[in-house]
Amino acid sequence: MVEASNVNKAVSNAIPPPPFELPFPDRPEVITTNMQKLNTLAESPRLKFLMENLVKHLHGFIQDTSLTTEEWMATIQYLTRVGQTCTDIRQEFILLSDILGVSALVDALNNPPSGNTTESSVLGPFFTEDAADIGKGESIASEGKGQYMWVEGRVLDTKGSPIPDVVIETWETDENGFYDTQYKDRSRPDCRGRLRSDKDGNFAYRAVVPVAYPIPSDGPVGDLLLKLRRHNMRPNHLHMMFEKPGFNKLTTALYPEGDPLNFSDAVFGVKKSLVVKLETVTSESEARAKGFAKGDSFKILKHEFILATEEEARVTRTQRAKEVGAEI
């Protein structure tokens, strides 16, 4: 007898065999047909729809490319490495999704422009939940993290009315092109913060001018980019996220104009409407008034953000789904 404590025992999930017979998979196409029959058992119409299309395109890809056993195993090993690279503060799977254009595509489909609303952009792999709460005009960056930048804006609905008390998350790189999570000695969040719009929808905070940077290339995603002969650079940008009950959550970023990488972003995040101009202010008194500790110059970024209501966003998504025949 085998000692039960010495075995990683698998347990039945108690689901009975399907109420129909499946033919033996004597030919490749029978495997696909059997899989699609099993998909009819899915617990919801949406899951059935997703699985049917996943099997259709995944099996079709394998058939069309005559995928070899060696290529299949290499893919399994690659995805295993992607998972093993992930940590609490590094998401290699999101990075893989980013460089394949999947993140941008999912974002674009789920956040189609609704009238005059602000366009979305990719979340990226560097968002964290531990940003410090800051007041209006306070800084998200510790001293010495880069060239000073004052960020101010207003949050409005599609009719132009201000939206108060919107939770705003913002994060960026320092002047070295690193997020705080990339520093091994990180002890607290830096170059990121959380604030709220005031009663008139206004907000303002101090930051630093972001710089272009390479996405992490020391893992499997970096290896894939090298094989594809693609650069791993992102243009300089400032991430922002806006959230309030009753409104569609907006995840976006602003990209200062003039960066040539705006046209070949490694993760396909740049949209024309999100490219902004930074103003330069040279005034020691104004720098002090804004709370900057040193020097006599800083950049200003001004932008209005327009949010759709949840209902407006739902109508837009439903209309698009109908146009392409998708079930939602």
Image: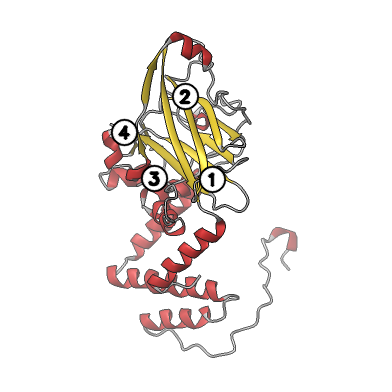
Which residue in the structure is indicated by mark 3? Answer: 221
Circle 3: element type: helix
Nearest-to-viewer mark from 3 and 1? 1
Q: Secondary structure at mark 2?
A: strand
Q: CA distance from mark 3 to mark 1?
A: 43 Å
Q: Nearer the viewer, residue 283 or 37?
A: 283
Q: How far is mark 2 from mark 1, CA to CA? A: 24 Å
19 w.r.t. 142: above or below? below
Q: Amino acid at mark 1?
A: Ser
28 or 238: which is nearer to us?
238
Q: Amino acid at mark 3?
A: Val
**For the residue marked with disc 2, what is the amino acid?**
Trp
Q: Select label 2 or label 3 by which is in front.
A: 2
Contact check, label 2 and label 1, Cβ < 8 Å = no
The spot of residue 195 in percent (x, y) is 60, 34
326 sits to left or right of 243: left
| Rendering coords of residue 25 (x, y %) | 43, 83
Residue for badge 1? 161
Mark 3 vs 1, N-terminal side: 1
The residue that appears at 29% across and 43% down in the rendered structure is 226
Amino acid carrying label 4: it is Glu
